[in-house]
Amino acid sequence: MTAELGGHPAGGDDSREGTVLQTLLRGLDVFEAVAERAGTATAKGLARQLGIRQSTCYHLLRTLRAGGYVVRLSTGQFDVGPRGASLGKSVSARTGPAPDISVILTRLHNKTRETSYVCGWFHGTIQRQQVITGLHSLNVKNLDVGYAGNMHARASCQAVLAFLPESQVRTMFSGVTLTRLTANTITDYDALVTELASVRRRGFALDIEAFESDICCVSAPFFDASGDPAGSFSVSVPVSRYGQVRNSLTSEVREAGVLATNLLRTGRLSVPTASSDSAVARTAQ
């Protein structure tokens, strides 16, 4: 099987993206599709899904198997191999929360007993990094780790966006369609800028059925050693219980943000005293 070239002719300056190997791109598509199928992928199904010849798919799978990126199971189906799994762990280590940040998330969940999650600002997106499901039933779509969509509608994202340079926010959202997800979703750039200013003033973000109907969310940011936003902690609850728990949830997500900020600035994880707990609670009201 010969490698197919696309784009500019080979031999050009790499800085101008001279050569594109279509075969490599197809191989990566196959690898990604195998990972998505979670051990149920077949060559025939992959070929149909990706719109390539079955013979080509077999060649690509054989190459990925030789490199250890996929394995063929006893059932004849394909799954991610050891090198593919190692690659996933490397990516997760870069984009996932640090162990101490996860510990803070666990504290937030233990104190609220609600669905809690942490997001991180990473390469121009705000990705959900870890989720701990609450004790109460909560039907929320797109709670997957790695989700980075609809940043304009999510409190977890607004908590970070509010503290980014205005030029970055404008570049991401000005002149861009802001999808309406519910009747409460902000769909106008100027309205988004106004909301982000409110988030900065109060120190936390609120989503009142803006991302999903019947769901409310409270989110607070945390900052790195340079004072730049690094991510956010959030808690989601049904709208039916939001009014009863809003103040307590706000206090807890803000505490989580303070803990993470202090951790990133000092390198030490310390639990606040009872008096500092009370101070956070008062400012949240």
Image (cartoon, rainbow, N blue to C red):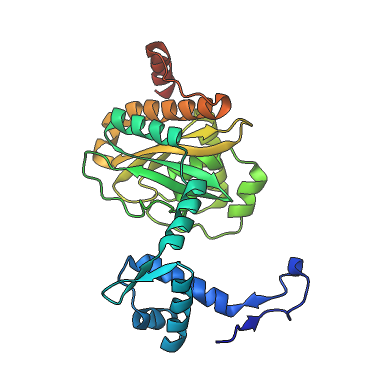
Placement of 67 over or under 239, stated as above or below: below
Q: Position of residue 249 (x, y in %)?
A: 34, 30
Q: Residue furthest front?
A: 66
Quadrant hosting residue 272: top left
Where is the N terminus found, in terms of image quarters?
bottom right
The residue shown at (61%, 84%) is 4
60 vs 257, nearest the viewer: 60
Quadrant hosting residue 108: top left
Q: Is residue 51 visible?
A: no
Q: Position of residue 85 (x, y in %)?
A: 42, 58
The residue shown at (45%, 20%) is 270
Placement of 53 over or under 31, stated as above or below: below
24 vs 265, nearest the viewer: 24
Q: Is residue 166 visible?
A: yes
166 vs 123, nearest the viewer: 123
Residue 208 horizontal side relative to residue 139, left or right:
right
The residue shown at (56%, 79%) is 23
The residue shown at (44%, 72%) is 65
Residue 125 horizontal side relative to residue 218, left or right:
right
Placement of 51 over or under 119, stated as above or below: below
Residue 154 horizontal side relative to residue 78, left or right:
right
Placement of 105 over or under 39, stated as above or below: above
Where is the C terminus found, in terms of image quarters?
top left
Q: Position of residue 271 (x, y in %)?
A: 41, 20
Marker count (numbered): 0
